[in-house]
């Protein structure tokens, strides 16, 4: 069995240098907009798809432009030979890593296995978009104007060159790159990257891998430019696929019967229909035509079956009383799903009909969630393999269709339904080149080892059962319970009134998640791994020892905390309330995320235990509580009778503003600021996994 296991892209748009492992069945690509997900689909199409070799200057990563300028400088100033500059010029490359079994039929993979290690079970194919030696001079030789001068580029050009030599040079590159660059394919020895085998063309690669694409741009809505019958038009694609010598016998029989039907219709039309049509021809005889040497005109009608399928065949939905509904009368979600299934059928049959089938078939599906309701989105991934099995069942005497799928999505429902190890998180980060950005891939198969197995199981279950937007948000707020979640939109609105317009949280893509009081610490390694700027809002949960058991109490009577998240954060299962109150903002911050818990309000000695009494202490007048030494105890007592959801809704709907507790206000102001630059990142302190179970060491009565 041969499988694609890895993709490495270098130099293509945001994919400056990314490596992605590929699952045996389905790999799910997630991430925010403009993070490079579509570029992954594009680069595979440009290397091994229908657009092979169709690159342009804009496809090179922005960070590579400096290399073009450097090579030109060496050419002009140092008169460097083309042979020296050839390897210095930027290239776009794609490495495909395949795994194989020792006893399996290697077939089309054989030319790419060039290592001598009997224990090695991988092979690497590299495709490069690189310059030819003969074209280096044409690429780099360009006369540019002096500063402030505009001259004509060559005798054939009428447009003056810009005064900026770099602008002129890149305009020249835009024209020359397609003429000088070309694809080249080689095999790479995984045990010795310097050992390569070059191929004369891409025939060996075509025999090894084939790609199919179901794009995100599916025009399903009727309109001036839209086409409400797009599903019907897919029938012509299925016909062309079936009308081949290598198609399945059942498909060939159907095509033969269709052609017979069309032939009978043609014969009938060429009889009476053409005779009547002849009567519509102009009276040419009045002008002496036809003469003795002229032939007579006569109409002859033929029917192109593909045109019939494309332009005149519609998909109808069965109705009652002989009234069947047009395709456009069904919901967009159903039509989208049917469209994807039709496309899968076309891709599958095209693969089956190949005279020599490639060893690997990789199929990209972009944003399948369009118009689908959440439950259908969640089912999509799990049913994808079932659909593949159904398609393969039509070929009982042939091997099953061993397609590998790469699904890119913006749907949290679809992403959460995927296995944790199948997630590839695309992140847009600054590049080392000034002013440039690049994609950073968080590969959960390879890189999430910092998350313990137990925590990964918990996160998978949590994210499957709840709507989790961590993969798509710019920032995140993790809260303990319903009160914080309900009130957070109003809290954000109050805080935004104090912030500069550029930093207001309401303008940023922020998700609020309710994670419970006992599980917040399980998200710490995930937030760290995603490099997602976040705050974790939790409670002090003050307790005191009484009769051998810890009981909850006001902070002024408390000794320590029962909060596992705080114990894990500070690495101390017996941390005292005094130590917690003494922690600085820097100690509450780790790279991209920060923890927030109750602290005294400005000018007040009182500290709350929970979100509810913190809200009361920040708004004593609203609760008619005197601002004296009893305030914290009274707030604690009132919070015990706090109707959490009811009171939260009352605060959320209150027309006048109220005071946001200081610990939340400080955290949200920090969250509103831009994320830290990658260069400023420092490794997080080690967290002892045992700390999550520290509460078990002492029984806490709440």
Image (cartoon, rainbow, N blue to C red):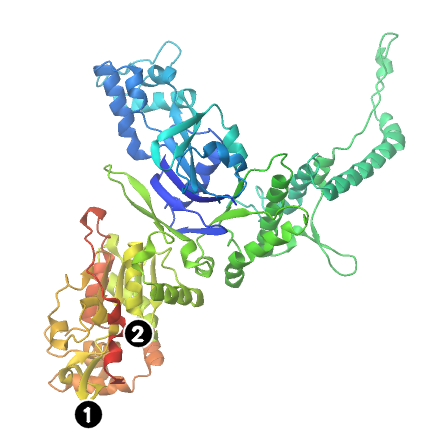
Report the residue at 40% width, 30% height from top.
128
- Give how far across and how far down residue 104 sits, in percent: 53, 43
Q: Residues within 10 Å of mark 2 (few under 14, many from 20)?
A: some
- Give how far across and how far down residue 674 sits, in percent: 24, 52
Tell which residue pokes out farthest to the bottom in this image: 547
Report the residue at 19% width, 69% height from top.
663
Q: Please report whichever mark, 1 or 2, sits nearer to the chain's N-terminal start.
A: 2
- Give how far across and how far down residue 685 sits, in percent: 19, 60
Tell which residue pokes out farthest to the front in this image: 118
SS class, disc 2: loop
The residue where tag 1 is placed is 547
Q: Quadrant of the C terminus?
A: bottom left
The residue where tag 2 is placed is 518
Question: In which quarter of the view is residue 525 placed?
Answer: bottom left
- Give how far across and how far down residue 46 sits, in percent: 46, 33
Q: Nearer the viewer, mark 1 or mark 2?
A: 1
Answer yes or no: is residue 164 visible: no
């Amino acid at each position: 069995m041969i499988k694609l296991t890895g993709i490495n892209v270098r130099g293509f748009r945001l994919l400056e240098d990314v490596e992605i492992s590929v699952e045996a069945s389905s790999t799910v690509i997630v991430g925010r907009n403009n993070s490079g997900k579509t570029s992954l689909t594009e680069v595979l199409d440009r290397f091994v798809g229908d657009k092979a070799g169709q690159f342009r200057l804009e496809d090179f990563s922005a960070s590579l432009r400096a290399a073009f300028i450097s090579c030109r400088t060496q050419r002009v100033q140092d008169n460097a030979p083309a042979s020296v500059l050839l390897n210095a010029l930027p290239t776009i490359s794609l490495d495909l890593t395949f795994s194989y079994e020792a006893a399996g039929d290697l077939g089309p993979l054989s030319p790419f296995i060039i290592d001598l290690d009997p224990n090695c079970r991988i092979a690497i194919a590299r495709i490069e978009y690189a310059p030819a030696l003969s074209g280096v001079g044409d690429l780099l030789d360009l006369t540019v104007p002096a500063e402030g001068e505009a001259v004509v580029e060559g005798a054939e050009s009428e447009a003056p060159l810009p005064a900026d030599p770099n602008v002129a040079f890149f305009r020249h590159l835009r024209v020359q790159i397609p003429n000088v660059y070309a694809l080249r394919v080689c095999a790479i020895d995984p045990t010795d990257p310097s050992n390569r085998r070059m191929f004369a063309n891409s025939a060996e690669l075509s025999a090894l891998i084939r790609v199919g694409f179901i794009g995100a741009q599916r025009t399903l809505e009727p309109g001036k430019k839209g086409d409400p019958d797009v599903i019907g038009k897919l029938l012509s694609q299925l016909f062309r696929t079936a009308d081949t010598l290598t198609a399945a016998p059942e498909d060939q029989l159907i095509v033969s019967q269709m052609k017979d039907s069309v032939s009978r219709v043609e014969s009938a039309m060429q009889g009476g229909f053409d005779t009547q049509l002849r009567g519509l021809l102009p009276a040419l005889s009045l002008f002496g035509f036809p003469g003795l040497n002229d032939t007579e005109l006569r109409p002859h009608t033929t029917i192109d079956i593909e045109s019939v399928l494309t332009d005149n065949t519609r998909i109808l939905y069965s109705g009652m009383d002989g009234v069947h509904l047009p395709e456009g009368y069904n919901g967009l979600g159903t039509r989208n799903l049917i469209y994807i299934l039709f496309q899968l059928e076309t891709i599958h049959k095209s693969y089956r009909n190949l005279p020599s089938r490639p060893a690997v078939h990789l199929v990209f599906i972009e944003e399948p969630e369009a118009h689908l309701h959440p439950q259908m989105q969640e089912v999509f991934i799990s049913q994808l393999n079932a659909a593949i099995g159904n398609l393969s069942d039509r070929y009982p005497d042939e091997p099953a269709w061993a397609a590998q799928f790469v699904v890119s999505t913006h749907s949290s429902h679809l992403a959460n339904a995927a296995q944790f190890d199948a997630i590839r998180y695309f992140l847009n980060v600054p590049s080392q080149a000034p002013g440039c950005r690049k994609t950073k891939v968080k590969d959960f198969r390879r890189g999430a080892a910092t998350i313990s197995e137990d925590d990964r199981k918990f996160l998978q279950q949590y994210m499957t059962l709840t709507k989790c937007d961590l993969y798509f948000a710019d920032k995140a707020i993790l809260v303990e319970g319903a009160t914080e979640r309900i009130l957070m939109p109003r809290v954000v609105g109050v805080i935004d009134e104090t912030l500069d317009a550029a930093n207001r949280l309401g303008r940023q893509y922020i998700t609020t998640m309710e994670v419970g009081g006992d599980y917040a610490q399980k998200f710490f390694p995930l937030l760290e791994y995603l490099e997602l700027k976040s705050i974790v809002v939790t409670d002090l949960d003050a307790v005191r020892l009484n009769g051998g058991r810890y009981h909850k109490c006001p902070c002024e009577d408390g000794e320590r905390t029962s909060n596992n998240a705080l114990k894990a954060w500070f690495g101390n299962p017996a941390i005292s309330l005094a130590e917690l109150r003494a922690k600085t903002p820097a100690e509450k911050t780790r790279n991209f995320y920060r923890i927030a818990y109750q602290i005294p309000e400005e000018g007040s000695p009182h500290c709350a235990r929970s979100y509810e009494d913190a809200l009361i202490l920040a708004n004593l007048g609203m609760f008619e509580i005197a601002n004296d030494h009893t305030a914290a105890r009274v707030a604690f007592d009132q919070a015990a009778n706090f109707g959490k959801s009811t009171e939260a809704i009352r605060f959320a709907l209150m027309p006048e503003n109220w005071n946001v507790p200081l610990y939340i206000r400080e955290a949200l102001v920090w969250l509103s600021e831009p994320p830290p630059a990658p260069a400023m990142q420092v490794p997080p302190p080690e967290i002892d996994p045992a700390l999550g179970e520290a509460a078990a060491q002492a029984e806490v009565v709440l």
